[in-house]
Image: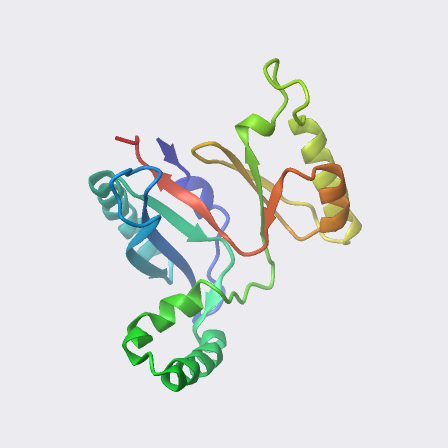
């Protein structure tokens, strides 16, 4: 089981009435081998306040446990005003293509693609098998990764941030943007996501 609910709560904020965070509960075939598709969206939430966040968490935990599903949250804020312009463009595209039945999912589709966070966060996705161990002598050292991330963030003249969240198979290091080329030259096997969701809750897999 992975429970990052309190850790993530400490990383979010609501400083504008139009801000929200996009949360999804996803059922994945890797956890449910009989699933017909790689992934099924169980439901989506738009979290607009700490009160809503706190009140929803027991329900989200129960739903994930019942469905053998995972909860993910986009750590970069969304904004209703900002998304409205992307919505207009997307609606026109959908209508022009004749796929009008897909309009019902347009807003959540746009939510997943466009953030409006002034303090943008990236996710450095590290699998356990990439970290140094006796079974993996060519793996990376966690200390070296953290040290380089701090240095590269400092080079941008912003205060470095590294929040470490456990995942099912490793860790998400939540950071501010940095020189991606330098990092990938040093750690080519580590993926960096510029606007992906992080794992909020994952039950014991059946």
Please identify the residue farthest to the right as the structure is shown.
Answer: 155
Is residue 132 positioned above or below 148 on the image?
above
Along the line of sight, the residue nearer the viewer: 81 or 198: 198
The structure residue drawn at horizontal position 69% and vertical position 39%, both measured from the top left corner, is 188
Residue 139 position in % (x across, y down): 65, 25
Q: Is residue 198 left or right of residue 183?
A: left
- Residue beneath the point at 40% across and 44% down: 200
Left or right: 70 as drawn, with respect to 145:
left
Which x, y percent locates residue 133? 61, 17
Residue 61: tell me if it is visible.
yes
Viewer can see residue 50: no
In this rendering, the answer to whether 11 lies above or below 167 is below
Q: Quadrant of residue 32?
A: top left
Q: Quadrant of the C terminus?
A: top left
Side of 51 where 178 appears, left or right: right
Q: Quadrant of the N terminus?
A: top left
Q: Is residue 92 above or below residue 145?
A: below
Tell me which residue sits at (22%, 43%) in the image: 67
């Amino acid at each position: 089981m992975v429970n990052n609910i309190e850790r993530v709560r400490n990383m979010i904020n609501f400083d504008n009435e139009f801000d929200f965070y996009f949360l999804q509960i996803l059922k994945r075939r890797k956890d449910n081998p009989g699933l017909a598709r790689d992934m099924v969206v169980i439901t989506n939430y738009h979290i607009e306040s700490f009160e809503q966040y706190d009140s929803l968490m027991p329900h989200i935990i129960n739903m994930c446990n019942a469905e053998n599903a995972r909860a993910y949250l986009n750590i970069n804020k969304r904004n209703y005003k900002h998304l409205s312009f992307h919505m207009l463009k997307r609606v026109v595209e959908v209508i022009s293509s004749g796929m009008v039945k897909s309009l019902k999912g347009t807003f959540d589709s746009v939510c997943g693609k466009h953030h409006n966070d002034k303090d943008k966060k990236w996710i450095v996705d590290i699998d356990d098998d990439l970290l140094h161990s006796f079974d993996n002598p060519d793996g990376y050292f966690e200390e070296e990764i953290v040290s380089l991330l701090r240095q590269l963030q400092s080079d941008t003249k912003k205060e470095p941030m590294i929040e470490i969240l456990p995942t099912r198979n490793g860790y998400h290091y939540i950071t501010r943007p940095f020189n991606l080329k330098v990092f990938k030259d040093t750690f080519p096997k580590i993926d960096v996501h510029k606007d992906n969701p992080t794992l909020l809750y994952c039950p014991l897999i059946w």
